[in-house]
Image (spheres, rainbow, N blue to C red):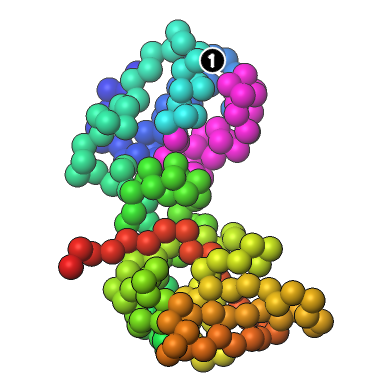
Amino acid sequence: MFANWSAMNGLEEDTALIKALCKWAGLAPSRLAKDADLTPTTILRPYNGTATTRISTPTIEKLKKAFPAFEWSRPEPDQLDARTEDDSVLVERLPTFAGMGGGGTGDGDGGTVAFSRALVEMDLRARPEDLLAIMAEGNSMEPDFKGGDQILIDTRRRSLAAPGAFCLWDSDGFVIKYLERVPGSDPAMVRIVSLRSDLYPPYERLVEECDIRGRVVWYGRRVQ
């Protein structure tokens, strides 16, 4: 059924798999999803060729459980060639650094950065388009974050209901700071805090003046 599998890329493999499964089962994609206890878009996107990420292993397991007699020929994740792109996803990169002492201007070339698919989809429970990769510079957030750290922010998470580390555009640049609402403030204010408060005192802004890009959810650091 999948004799030409090796000639396909990962997304094409998933499309071929889902179409073959629908044909074998005699079911429309939406009904296939329902029978496997999946949301319709999980099946419709690869079926229509509009998916931007591979079908996850948990989804495949649900399909196998629902249709065990189907000839399952899709390689398992641990069988994929490490040289292929199937094990990674591309995340948009901020076209500047995010300052921890002084802000990045936003000037520069954008692009993408490759991250582990397992990290993005399983650990962070995100899609590549939900995230933004940022290179940090400065010392105001030490020891939690250091200059040179590669940081991922989740652009879906902008609420200040819980304080935490965020990336924001703060009047003259992109910065990584801890943010917390000022209790009882009217109009609503946010306190912007650096861990090195001896060098960078906290200050406050109106919430509506803060262009919050997302909450920090991961960072990577080179061993010195």
- Is 61 in front, or is 54? 61
The image quarter in which residue 99 lies: bottom left
The image quarter in which residue 82 lies: top left
- Is 200 in front, or is 20? 200
- Structural crowding at the residue carrying mark 1, measured as other residues with C-alpha within 10 Å and reported as few (<14), some (14–19) or many (≥20): some
Residue 180: x %, y % from top left = 63, 72
Point 55% across, 85% down: residue: 202
Q: Which residue is mark 1?
A: 66
Q: Is residue 183 left or right of residue 40?
A: right
Q: Is residue 106 visible?
A: no
Point 31% across, 43% down: residue: 87
Residue 174: x %, y % from top left = 48, 81
The image quarter in which residue 27 lies: top right
Query: Where 134 falls versus 62 (above or below)?
Result: below
Query: Where 96 falls versus 134 (above or below)?
Result: below
Q: Is residue 81 left or right of residue 119?
A: left
Image: magenta residue range: 30-56
Q: How many marks?
A: 1
Task: Tell me the amino acid under the disc marked 1.
Answer: Ala
Point 42% across, 76% down: residue: 141
